[in-house]
Image: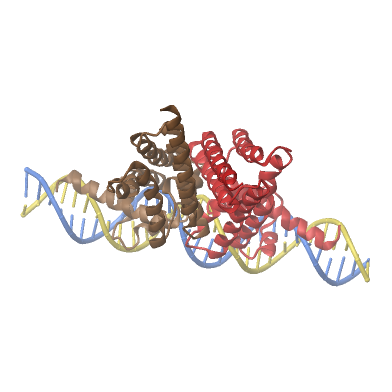
Chain colours: A brown, B red, C yellow, D blue
DNA sequence: CCAAAAGTAAACAGATCTGTTTACTCGTCG
DNA sequence: CGACGAGTAAACAGATCTGTTTACTTTTGG
């Protein structure tokens, strides 16, 4: 392990731990002392890699954005089913997951909610997280051969993010059921459009 | 104005001001000093009516929940159009509104995001806000005579809340356009169901 | 083996937060 | 008039927050 790797290892360790704490506790409510507690990492090291807590938050959002795409879509990508079945399976998998581990929503949206009108940099990084996820929905719709994949992908993202939030608010996974029913109707509507054009 | 009225007037004044500040700045990021600044209200009075900041937050959520229903649905209820047109107009009105004033999302969802896993009382009040809005969507679908109004109403709420959040994240009203397109498809699908039953 | 780099631990500064207390003002009602 | 209820203003207590500094330890490369 050379120097650069070691340093980056420490930096990554901080980001991962900060992610856990921010995700569970929120950004404003989680202090840097809480992040470092029981880790053996000193505050000085944190402020060496990140000039301020806001910089750390932006790094955590970048880390989360890169991680969440695989976390969301790998389980259905390896499903070897038709694209339509993969999209429907996506909502089932999400629903099942949130019944096992408590749902805290999307960290990008959480950040945007907490910093809207107050910190443009963090807003930009939060936006990137959501755009990444949206773009994968659109790609999935393209590969599935739907007419107007950009619009359909955005609508799937809308239903997914809405279901995430409402299931958090309700403390119950049923919004994913409503979302899936809506997705079925939307996919059927697009298929009708395709057959009309064919 | 008798004694009780005057007191309740003061209480309401605090709640209204707190709503403005919380809505714009978030719950954790807004201190009670900020709420009282430039109002001439003293901290002692605030803590007379509300034993703690958390109690104030719950009162603000109740106030918001009662207010937001009219704010959202009165503009379309007075439209004297078919229920289908009213539902579509709802999304147009919301889009137009957020182009005028900066969108901060739903306060109930904001509260749930900030206090999930940490304060059950606030979570319950936040949930009530969202349930109120959802129930009006369902009522609207019932009056419109759709088959399965409960499911459709929940889906409309899902699309609305998703569009609110994403338009906040993106800083742009286009998610309301995607949501409206999805709503058109969903309403058409339900109408097909209705005509099949007729 | 030794010097530089990297890290821990802990005190510290200064700001800010919730909530309490003290002292004063003012309008109302008997 | 006089007492009381409601309110303002401001100091205060104690906790917590971000960020800095000082002193010491560990690791690593030549």
Residue C10: x percent and y percent? 34, 63
Query: Image check: B97 left or right of D18?
Result: right
Does residue D27 lie above or below A65 as drawn? below
Residue B87: x percent and y percent? 63, 41
Query: Image check: C21 left or right of C3?
Result: right
Residue B57 is at least partly visible in this image: yes
The residue positioned 35% from the left and 61% from the top of the image is A37
The residue positioned 39% from the left and 59% from the top of the image is A34
The quarter of the picture where the C terminus of chain A appears is top left
Q: Nearer the viewer, residue B39 or A57?
A: A57
Q: Nearer the viewer, residue A83 or A197?
A: A197
Does residue A98 lie above or below B140 as drawn? below
Q: Nearer the viewer, residue B118 or B124?
A: B124
Query: Image check: B148 left or right of A195?
Result: right
Q: Quadrant of residue B7?
A: bottom right
Q: Nearer the viewer, residue B78 or A42?
A: B78
Residue A2: x percent and y percent? 14, 46
């Amino acid at each position: 392990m050379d120097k650069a790797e070691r340093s980056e290892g420490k930096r990554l360790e901080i980001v991962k731990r900060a992610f856990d704490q921010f995700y569970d506790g929120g950004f404003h409510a989680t202090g840097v002392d809480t992040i470092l507690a029981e880790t053996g990492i000193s505050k000085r090291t944190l402020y060496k890699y990140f000039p301020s807590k806001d910089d750390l938050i932006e790094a955590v959002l970048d880390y989360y954005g890169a991680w969440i795409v695989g976390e969301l879509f790998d389980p259905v990508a390896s499903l070897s089913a038709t694209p339509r079945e993969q999209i429907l399976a996506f909502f089932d998998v999400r629903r099942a997951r949130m019944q096992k581990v408590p749902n805290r929503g999307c960290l990008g949206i959480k950040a945007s909610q907490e910093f809207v009108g107050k910190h443009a940099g963090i807003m930009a990084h939060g936006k990137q997280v959501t755009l990444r996820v949206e773009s994968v929905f659109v790609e999935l719709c393209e590969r599935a051969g739907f007419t107007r994949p950009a619009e359909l992908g955005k609508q799937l993202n809308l239903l997914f993010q809405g279901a995430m939030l409402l299931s958090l608010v309700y403390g119950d996974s049923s919004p994913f059921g409503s979302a899936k029913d809506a997705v079925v109707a939307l996919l059927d509507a697009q298929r009708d459009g395709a057959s009309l054009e064919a």
